[in-house]
Image (cartoon, coloured by chain):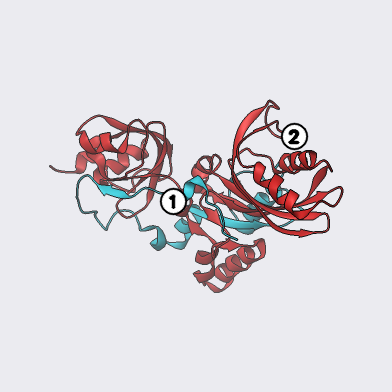
Amino acid sequence: MTGILPIALERATKVVQSWLPAGKEYICIMRLHKEVDHEKIEAICQEFTGPLYQRPPLRSSVKRRLRIRRVYYTNVLEIFGSDVLIRVGCEAGFYMRKLVHDIGEVLGTGAHMLELRRTRAGPFKEDDTFVTLLEVNDAYHYWKEDGNEQYLRKVIQPVEEGLVHLPKLVIRDSAVDAICHGAKLTAPGVLKLSDDIKPGATVAILTQKGEAVGIAEAVMLSKEILEIDHGVVANTKKVIMPRSMYPEWKSFKK
Amino acid sequence: MERGRLPSDVRGELITKAQEATNPEWGYKPAERPIKEHLAFGIINLDKPAGPTSHEVVAWVKRILELKKAGHGGTLEFC
């Protein structure tokens, strides 16, 4: 298995949890155990979209009970003999190996997964930030040995790039240090907000400079946050920024 | 062929509740962190090679960059 494996370093490891429930996209080679008419393959693959029941495979990291996972799209890209190249966008926790097996059952030939590559995961894509281990290694040595940090900044992204898939709450300078101490975010601290926040949603708390302060769980709708002038709007779940980057609120004069 | 969309492709608009300036003396814009800070608040969109496990790849990254802590977002082993 190859492809997108987002890695968080040091303090950025706090954001990893927000990546896990995000949607994924895979490209996979499915080997049918007998050749099948192309139109039939195309038609059956289209059946496997929408909410699907799936029992996690034997080799999995979760309890093996029947559960529902959504497949957002399935594209048949190429058919070569009994090998079928497909691209699938799906919900987190959907098993591609199982999908291939199940398509094989419905086709009546049986099928297994030959190769798998992840092409998207939440905010991550195969774009110009996508790098190999070798590039990471070279970039580090350019910096270590020649003092050239240009390449290191290309292979390593700021933690904020890993939060772009979340709704945002932009807060006042005077609210930052309290969040760094784990305090809940209250209405007066909010300057800007995404218009799609819902109660229970995971949101990113950012400074006006765009720095990640933490990750929180919203307790109300955007509309409500916009209207109220006191009270908790989000419970802080993870603190990314270290304390004392910003002064404590008491030092701010009215 | 047109590529489908994941739910996270749909993003809300930012609306303003109140206005205030930020003091440039505190914190950094994400792209302007000193390089050591950039490492400590960094993420890598890595192309995992075939062969080693996700866990092993993270261990390599840690060793290459001489870091104490690193973690990955979902293994590629049980997919």
Q: Looking at the figure, which quarter contains the C terminus of chain A?
A: top left
* Residue carrying label 1: A164
Q: Is residue B67 above or below residue A196?
A: below
- Residue A31 x %, y %: 81, 51
Q: CA distance from mark 2 to mark 1?
A: 32 Å
State the residue at coordinates (42%, 61%). Answer: B34
Chain coloured cyan? B
* Circle 2 residue: A57
**Could you tell me which chain the residue with mark 2 belongs to?**
A
Q: Is residue A68 above or below residue B29?
A: above
Q: Residue at x 50, y 70 (%)?
A: A150
Judging depth in this view, the residue of A236 and B9 nearest the camera is: B9
- Would you say B47 lies left or right of A19 here? right
Q: Earlier in the sequence, mark 2 or mark 1?
A: 2
- The chain drawn in red is A
Specify the amino acid type for callout 1.
Val
